[in-house]
Image: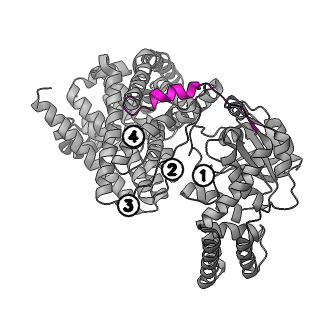
């Protein structure tokens, strides 16, 4: 089967095109850095595989995700390259195209965002562009799929076949250096050695490592230093700058042949909106207002009524039907209790919050796809810079609102190792969807009139503590020079319903899947622990093994306001997945529905201790999947253990201050 590599600049619609061509769904965002590792899909015709690579501006890697592209070109076998090009940013995109053409593989261009370019007065003659680069060019609209059939036919018919790699003449001095490299290299490669030489002289770190494996250090250093010295003397600029200028000159000549520009005298709608939302004084307050409205929709206006309907279904018709069925088949009392009091109470008690979670993700997807979140990263940059991070770190943190696991992985886009590590350590403080059932349960019981403002406070608290710790870490254990944040602001666009639904489902499906795995298994285990005790089975709950385990933690939790074995057991099981905290409580308190549970909890918690409990759930140890991802990304047991330890200490201190401080003030 043929293999096609999909390569392009960040935020050019690459993942949208991948989804259209393969009929799959990968996470799409209207900002850069969405794709951080290669993804493989099969074309709709089932005749070729497509590999979606992280977006890069150049083959010269700066961050970890960008190294994936150069590594792929050098070490993996594939047949063609599909290069997606943003028509509204043609010069910048063609700088990458030139490097791909020098690589010599058959290549085709999917020209995306032609409509955006034309609104900016940029008109591209696609026929002339194809002639200038000697590759096929197909206009596409990646978001809607327009032109994708033609792209697939072109790839399968191999009209992309190219006889020779593109050769840009870099001048006498540079050409001599290239010839010396080729003569020294000697061996045949599956790619042009000339391309390897140019990337080597440009300072491509991955290529340099590749060369260092095959040539003695003295040899490759001599090659580089001689070329650097000669170019410096002849051209008065560095090797990398000289190569860049030569490519840029070539691209400019192409653009002069194929682009016509028309002066656009009016200010665009995007420009007018940006004046307000990126304003340094009102940008952050506007973001907080948007999040407040989002939480009102999630918890008050839309989510609560839908959750009540689902809760009534689980407590009424479903429980009654299952009970009747079990009685009809003669199931034992043990089995009936396990299914009704364990599985339905545990799993159902979490699933009733599915409407709220999907509503929240729907509106977060709306903000992402509209292009607004890229502006949020921009307005946060000043604040992030003051604590030792930059605005790019805010993007993994926002992704962490959905699930901490992809948030930790998204830190790969950050160039500086210190900032990348710090972002991975702090992302678990972002309030992910798994915490939402806990918030929904407690705010419904104790803060019914102010649900949105309490949940917004918890989200802001997570971000605020992450920024404070970033400042603390950057001054102590993670000192390093900060990097500069550059973000491309995409034009605003109205999200499409299909894309919104796919994005919402992609974010929320993990929650539903966990209901059938972690939460199901956890519910069975927790119910068994509550059913069995040192003195036999079917014991009183207070005499069960679960009570013994929770009782060990209870004295430690007493200063935080929730020193009961029930709270201790719920928090312990939450390490598997935060949703299990709610399923544990449903089983322990053994009530038919969420409303009854909230009523019963009023006798075990006060409003202050409930708030302290929610803060503790927000901050204490990351879930098992997040811990595994941190270990995988850092490759360090020390930093993985640190991520658990500091979170636990932080949660204890903050909850202690809230409960003890609140008690002193008379709350």
Name above or below for residue 259 compared with residue 303: below
Residue 100 coordinates in the image, percent (x, y): 73, 57
Q: Residue at x 57, y 43 (%)?
A: 32
Q: Secondary structure at mark 2?
A: helix
Q: Secondary structure at mark 1?
A: loop
- Mark earlier in primary sequence (3, 2): 2
- Which residues, given as a range, are shown in magenta? 260-282
Q: Are marks 3 and 2 in contact (CB under 8 Å)?
A: no
Residue under label 1: 37
- Mark earlier in primary sequence (3, 1): 1
- Mark earlier in primary sequence (4, 2): 2
Q: Of 251 and 485, which appears nearest the observer? A: 251
Which marked residue is nearer to the observer: mark 3 or mark 2? 3
Residue count near mark 3 (Cα–Cα under 10 Å), binned few <14, some 14–19, many ≥20: few
640 with respect to 497 (left or right) = left
Residue under label 3: 480
Q: Which mark is residue 430?
A: 4
Q: Which mark is residue 409?
A: 2
Label 1 – label 2 distance at C-alpha: 9 Å
Residue count near mark 1 (Cα–Cα under 10 Å), binned few <14, some 14–19, many ≥20: some
Q: Is residue 570 visible?
A: no
Label 1 – label 4 distance at C-alpha: 22 Å
- Mark earlier in primary sequence (1, 2): 1
Res 250 → quadrant = bottom right
Name above or below for residue 383 compared with residue 665: below
- Mark earlier in primary sequence (1, 4): 1
């Amino acid at each position: 089967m043929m293999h096609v590599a999909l390569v392009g600049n960040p935020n050019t619609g690459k993942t949208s095109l991948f989804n259209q061509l393969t009929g799959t769904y990968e996470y799409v965002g209207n900002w850069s850095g969405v794709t951080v590792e290669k993804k493989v899909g099969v074309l709709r015709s089932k005749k070729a595989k497509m590999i979606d690579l992280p977006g890069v501006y150049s083959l010269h890697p700066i961050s970890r995700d960008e190294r994936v592209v150069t590594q792929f070109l050098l070490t993996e076998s594939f047949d063609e390259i599909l290069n997606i090009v943003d028509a509204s940013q043609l010069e910048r995109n063609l700088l990458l195209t030139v490097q791909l053409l020098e690589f010599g593989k058959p290549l085709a261009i999917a020209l995306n965002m032609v409509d955006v370019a034309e609104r900016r007065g940029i008109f591209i003659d696609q026929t002339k562009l194809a002639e200038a680069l000697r590759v096929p060019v197909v206009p596409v609209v990646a978001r809607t799929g327009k032109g994708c059939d033609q792209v697939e036919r072109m790839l399968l018919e191999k009209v992309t076949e190219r006889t020779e790699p593109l050769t840009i003449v870099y001048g006498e001095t540079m050409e001599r250096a290239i010839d010396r490299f080729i003569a020294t290299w000697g061996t045949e490669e599956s790619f042009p050695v000339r391309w390897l030489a140019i990337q080597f002289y440009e300072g491509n770190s991955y290529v340099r490592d590749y060369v260092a494996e095959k040539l003695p250090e003295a040899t490759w250093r001599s090659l580089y230093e001689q070329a650097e010295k000669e170019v410096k003397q002849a051209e008065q600029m560095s090797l990398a700058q000289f190569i860049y200028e030569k490519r840029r000159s070539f691209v400019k000549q192409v653009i002069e042949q194929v682009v016509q520009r028309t002066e656009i005298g009016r200010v665009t709608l995007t420009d007018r909106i940006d004046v307000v939302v990126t304003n340094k004084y009102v940008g952050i307050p506007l973001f907080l207002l948007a999040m407040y409205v989002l939480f009102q929709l999630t918890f008050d206006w839309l989510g609560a009524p839908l959750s009540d309907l689902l809760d009534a279904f689980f407590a009424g018709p479903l429980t009654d039907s299952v009970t009747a069925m079990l009685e009809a088949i003669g199931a034992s009392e043990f089995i009936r209790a396990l299914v009704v009091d364990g599985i339905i109470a545990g799993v159902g008690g979490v699933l009733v919050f599915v409407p709220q979670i999907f509503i929240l993700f729907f509106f977060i997807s709306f903000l992402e796809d509209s292009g607004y979140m890229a502006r949020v990263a921009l307005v946060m940059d000043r604040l992030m810079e003051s604590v030792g991070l930059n605005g790019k770190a805010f993007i993994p943190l926002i992704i962490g609102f959905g699930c901490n696991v992809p948030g930790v992985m998204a830190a790969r886009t950050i160039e500086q190792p210190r900032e990348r590590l710090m972002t991975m350590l702090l992302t678990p403080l972002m309030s992910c969807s798994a915490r939402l059932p806990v918030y929904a349960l407690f705010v419904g019981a104790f803060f019914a009139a102010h649900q949105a403002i309490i949940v917004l406070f918890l989200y802001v608290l997570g971000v605020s503590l992450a920024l404070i710790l970033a400042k603390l870490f950057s001054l102590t254990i993670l000192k390093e020079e900060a990097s500069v944040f550059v973000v491309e602001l995409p034009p605003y666009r109205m999200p499409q319903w299909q894309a919104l639904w796919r994005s919402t489902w992609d974010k929320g499906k993990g929650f539903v899947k966990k209901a059938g795995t972690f939460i199901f298994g956890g519910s069975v285990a927790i119910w068994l622990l509550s059913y069995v005790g040192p003195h036999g089975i079917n014991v009183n709950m207070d005499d069960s093994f679960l009570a013994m385990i929770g009782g060990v933690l209870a004295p430690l939790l007493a200063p935080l306001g929730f020193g009961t074995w029930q709270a201790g057991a719920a928090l312990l099981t939450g390490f598997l997945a935060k949703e299990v905290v709610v399923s544990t409580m449903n089983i322990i308190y053994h009530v038919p529905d969420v409303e009854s549970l909230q009523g019963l909890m009023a006798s075990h918690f006060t409003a202050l201790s409930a708030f302290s409990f929610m803060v503790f759930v927000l901050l204490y140890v990351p879930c098992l999947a997040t811990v595994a991802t941190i270990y995988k990304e850092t490759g360090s047991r020390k930093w993985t253990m640190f991520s658990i330890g500091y979170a636990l200490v932080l949660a204890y201190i903050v909850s202690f201050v809230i409960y003890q401080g609140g008690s002193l003030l008379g709350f």
